[in-house]
């Protein structure tokens, strides 16, 4: 079938994550395409957790409802997940808890004394490696690849640990081979190693930031954004930079404003609650026209919400948050490759237009691993934006007009240290010189100048990505990580009707013309997004989209959109489109 | 640049919007004098100003000035300093800005020891919002938001700074110019975080903590020949004994390394002057580490 869903489940704190990582990494190295999805909770120990690794011979960018091989370390894992295992699949379980399938189940149950083997080896921690070995056998994946990775992974812990883990792996493999279920139909076609990376969106953001020349990162730990800080804390010092763990998110954003003002590429990364705290600081960046890059890894809200669950509900907060109407840009990557691209673009826009740029990521993109086609060096170019030259400053008769009125709205800035470039950068309304002023005429001119930057930017950059034929029966409009499941659902719908997809890549300034043009010829429009309010749909409506045949598919229960569910909504939208035509 | 900076260089043509007699005029004058004495070029000086009457000080000094949101001067100043460590970075604000809304940053700035000078202009009152309780208002102070007298114990900024690990702590009085100029020069010259609280009376809304009152109650550390400013415990004891009604250099630790000095890979050359270029080979090397 070329697409296998393997899942391991057990109690949180029992190494489920690192076990899933082994499977994902080895399969990726073998040349398969991976999508790794962890269901976890906001605690360190206890409670059920599982990790799905989808292994395919083609790119996959979503989880699936299906499970082919379920590895159960507790009975709860079986009880909660077995219904997803279809005919031809198998359940592998530790004999230690006397696993039982539901009454009448026809599924193959492979019982292996995992904990017992681990104890005999002399290292109870190798239990999960027994499970990996057994999985390798059931998936017909080469043991050598697992052995090589395990040797590498445990090398730091010494020869004995390596030997114990290899032994566990081997015994699990042998035990599973000995009881290979007859009806097991899981087969992956052989593929060649392709040297592709397996990354999360957070890793791509960190890498892209370094590639883009970010040198200062300030943040406060928060799920699901913390990895960005943890990646950069080792990366940035190699390029002379620094990560500052601050006392709160307000300190983080205002530090970024200080660094941006002084001419260094700086960023912060946070999630909902921290993003709310940053609103005033972002307003300062907008008013004082200081570059700032803010990554918001959205999670379920409001308030503390569900910190470990995905949602895309900060759209309105990102665009309209804070008081007084502050000009900003909001980008929304949907894949790991796009996250890399967008963080590079964010720095260029921030410095090119002197404003805060928000990269609205989401938990699924931030945390789940994907096989990445490439993060091309040329995918990011460093463009520093207008800075006044020393010669211009030297020739000035009066002071430097930092906030000079221009057609584009963008006015060159000076950087502290530049002789004769002194000015007042302020969140108070100001004259072109920076001096504070409440003059009504000037107020309008400076406010219009800041807003004009957005119009200029919107003319220069596309804000959507379209896939499919023109004038489709159904146009699916979506954004963020949901695009992965949407694209797969469209693939599943082939032959049923013409379906196209519009991914909104820039939420603000909203690419209204592109969205209206795409929707105009569509038989029906289907909005797919992960929030209760339909924030993207509202945004489109505000921008003038009023399609007579519009459907909405929204999810806000903390679980993932699955391609199968979206396919159902597409079919129903196709019906709607057909009615509209007749 | 030594000797080439004059008072005219550090002034702006902006009119000062403070009440006649405001203590902030004295702070401004002393700061301008200190900058001239230290021969800091206007383009090398960054003022990070808070919100409130005192936050306007940056408007009147010819320098790079960033006027930020209420209470957040210190993290912004840290960002400026890390971006360009060759600049002289001064954070300035009032007692409300620093010890109410900004208190969290104050404590953390003290313990981090970034090479930034923090000057507070302390008048024990909210002036710009016209007379509310400040974190440094005396217990019993009758103000608009405590008409029967404040029932809260005041914040003691010097003790807080000492307890939080600040490596330079002093207090000045805006009407004692000579001493204030020297304190400012010492604070700016200190390598690390320096905290100078300046008593800067509000003549409009604070009729208790007046110039006359301060002149009676303040003692000068410089007049105590036995006082040593290199002992944190002694400094703490003195601040407690005097209820912080003192002026002078209370404490300094010249040996403590600054935050920047301890950062791995942080070069003496300012970050803002460094190249952002990365070679394709460096990029491939980074990616290879993730394979």
Image (cartoon, coloured by chain):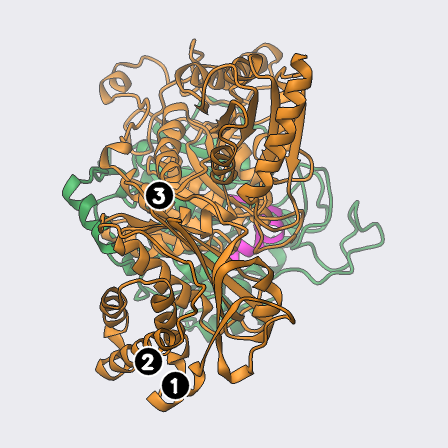
In this structure image, what is the colour of chain A? orange
Q: Which residue is mark 1?
A: A117
Q: For residue B42, what is the image quadrant? A: top left
The kind of secondary structure element at disc 3 is: loop
Which residue is at a point 57% across and 69% down the rendered structure image?
A: A78
Circle 2 Cα neighbour tier, 10 Å, few/some/many (<14 / 14–19 / ≥20): many
Q: Secondary structure at mark 1?
A: helix
Magenta span: chief secondary structure: helix
Q: How many marks?
A: 3
Q: Same chain for labels 3 and 2? Say yes or no.
A: yes
Q: Chain of mark 2?
A: A
Give the CA separation, mark 3 to mark 1.
Answer: 36 Å
Residue B106 highlighted magenta (yes or no): yes
Residue A473: give x, y in percent of width and height: 56, 19
Subunit that carries the residue with mark 3:
A
Q: Is residue A491 visible?
A: yes
Of marks 3 and 1, which one's residue comes earlier in the chain?
3
Say which residue appears at 59% left-offset and 53% top-offset. Answer: B99
Q: Position of residue A407 (x, y in %)?
A: 43, 9
Highlighted magenta segment, given as a residue range? B92-107
Q: Are marks 1 and 2 in contact (CB under 8 Å)?
A: yes
């Amino acid at each position: 079938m070329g697409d296998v869903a393997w899942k391991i489940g057990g109690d949180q704190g029992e190494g489920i994550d690192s076990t899933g990582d082994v499977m994902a990494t080895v399969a990726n190295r073998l040349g398969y395409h991976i999508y790794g999805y962890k269901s976890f909770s906001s605690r360190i120990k206890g409670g059920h957790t599982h990790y799905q690794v989808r292994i395919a011979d083609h790119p996959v960018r979503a989880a699936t409802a299906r499970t082919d091989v379920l590895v159960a370390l507790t009975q709860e894992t079986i009880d909660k997940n077995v219904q997803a295992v279809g005919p031809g699949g198998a359940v592998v379980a530790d004999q230690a808890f006397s696993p039982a399938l539901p009454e009448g189940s026809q599924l193959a149950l492979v019982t292996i004394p995992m904990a017992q083997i681990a104890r005999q080896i002399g290292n109870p921690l190798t239990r999960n490696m027994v499970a990996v070995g057994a999985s390798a056998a059931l998936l017909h994946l080469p043991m050598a690849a697992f052995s090589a990775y395990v040797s590498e992974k445990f090398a730091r812990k010494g020869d004995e640990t390596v030997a114990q883990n290899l032994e566990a792996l081997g015994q699990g493999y042998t035990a599973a081979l000995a009881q290979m279920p007859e009806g097991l139909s899981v087969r992956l076609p052989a593929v060649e190693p392709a040297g592709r990376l397996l990354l999360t969106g957070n890793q791509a953001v960190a890498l892209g930031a370094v590639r883009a020349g970010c040198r200062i990162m300030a943040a406060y730990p928060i799920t699901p954004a913390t990895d960005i800080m943890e990646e950069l804390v080792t990366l940035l010092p190699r390029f002379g930079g620094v990560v500052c763990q601050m006392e709160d998110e307000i300190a983080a954003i205002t530090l970024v404003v200080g660094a941006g003002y002084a001419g260094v590429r700086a960023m912060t990364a946070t999630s909902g609650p921290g993003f709310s705290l940053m609103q005033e600081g972002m307003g300062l960046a907008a008013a004082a026209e200081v570059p700032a890059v803010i990554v918001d890894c959205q999670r379920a809200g409001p308030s503390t919400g569900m910190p470990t669950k995905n949602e895309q509900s900060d759209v309105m907060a990102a665009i309209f948050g804070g008081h007084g109407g502050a000009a900003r840009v909001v980008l929304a990557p949907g894949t790991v490759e796009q996250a890399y691209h967008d963080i590079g673009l964010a720095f260029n826009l921030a410095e090119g237009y002197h404003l805060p740029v928000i990269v609205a990521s989401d938990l699924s993109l931030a945390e789940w691993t994907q096989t990445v086609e490439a993060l091309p060096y040329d995918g990011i170019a460093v463009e520093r934006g207008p800075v006044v030259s020393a010669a211009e400053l030297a020739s000035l008769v009066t002071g430097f007009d930092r906030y000079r009125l221009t057609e584009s709205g963008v006015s060159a800035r000076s950087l502290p240290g530049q002789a004769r470039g002194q000015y007042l950068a302020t969140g108070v309304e100001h004259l072109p010189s920076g001096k504070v002023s409440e003059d009504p005429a000037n107020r309008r001119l400076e406010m219009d100048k800041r807003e004009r930057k957005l119009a200029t930017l919107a003319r220069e950059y596309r804000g959507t990505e379209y896939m499919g034929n023109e004038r489709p029966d159904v146009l699916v409009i979506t954004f963020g990580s949901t695009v992965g499941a949407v694209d797969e659902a469209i693939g599943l719908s082939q032959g049923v009707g013409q379906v196209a997809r519009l991914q909104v890549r820039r939420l603000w300034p909203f690419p209204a013309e592109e969205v209206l043009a795409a929707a105009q010829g569509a038989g029906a429009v289907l909005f797919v997004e992960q929030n209760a309010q339909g924030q993207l749909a509202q945004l489109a409506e505000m921008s003038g989209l009023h399609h007579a045949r519009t459907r909405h598919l929204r999810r806000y229960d903390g679980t993932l959109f699955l391609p199968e569910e979206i396919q159902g909504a597409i079919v129903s939208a196709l019906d709607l489109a057909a009615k509209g035509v007749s | 640049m030594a000797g080439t900076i004059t008072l005219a260089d550090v002034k702006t043509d902006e009119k000062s919007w403070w009440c006649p007699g405001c203590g902030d005029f004295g702070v401004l004058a002393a700061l301008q004098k200190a900058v001239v004495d230290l021969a800091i070029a206007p383009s090398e000086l960054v003022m990070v100003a808070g919100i409130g009457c005192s936050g306007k000080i940056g408007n009147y000094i010819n320098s790079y000035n960033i006027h930020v949101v209420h209470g957040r001067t210190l993290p912004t100043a840290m960002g400026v300093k890390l971006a360009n460590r060759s600049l002289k970075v001064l954070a300035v604000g009032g007692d409300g800005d620093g010890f109410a809304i900004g208190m969290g940053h104050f404590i953390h700035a003290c313990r981090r020891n970034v090479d930034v000078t923090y000057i507070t202009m302390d008048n024990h009152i909210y002036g710009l919002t016209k007379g509310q309780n400040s974190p440094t208002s005396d217990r019993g102070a009758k103000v608009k938001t405590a008409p029967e007298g404040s029932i809260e114990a005041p914040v003691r900024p010097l003790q807080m700074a000492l307890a939080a690990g600040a490596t330079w702590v002093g207090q000045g009085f805006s009407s004692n110019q000579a001493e204030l100029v020297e304190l400012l020069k010492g604070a700016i010259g200190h390598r690390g975080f320096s905290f100078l609280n300046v008593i800067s009376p509000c003549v409009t809304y604070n009729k208790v903590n007046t110039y006359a009152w301060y002149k009676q109650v303040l003692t000068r550390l410089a007049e105590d020949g036995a006082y040593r400013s290199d002992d944190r415990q002694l400094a703490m004891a003195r601040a407690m004994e005097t209820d912080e009604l003192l002026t002078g250099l209370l404490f300094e630790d010249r040996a403590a390394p600054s935050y920047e000095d301890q950062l791995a890979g942080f070069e003496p050359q300012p970050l803002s002057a460094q190249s952002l270029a990365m070679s394709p080979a460096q990029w491939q090397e980074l990616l290879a580490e993730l394979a």
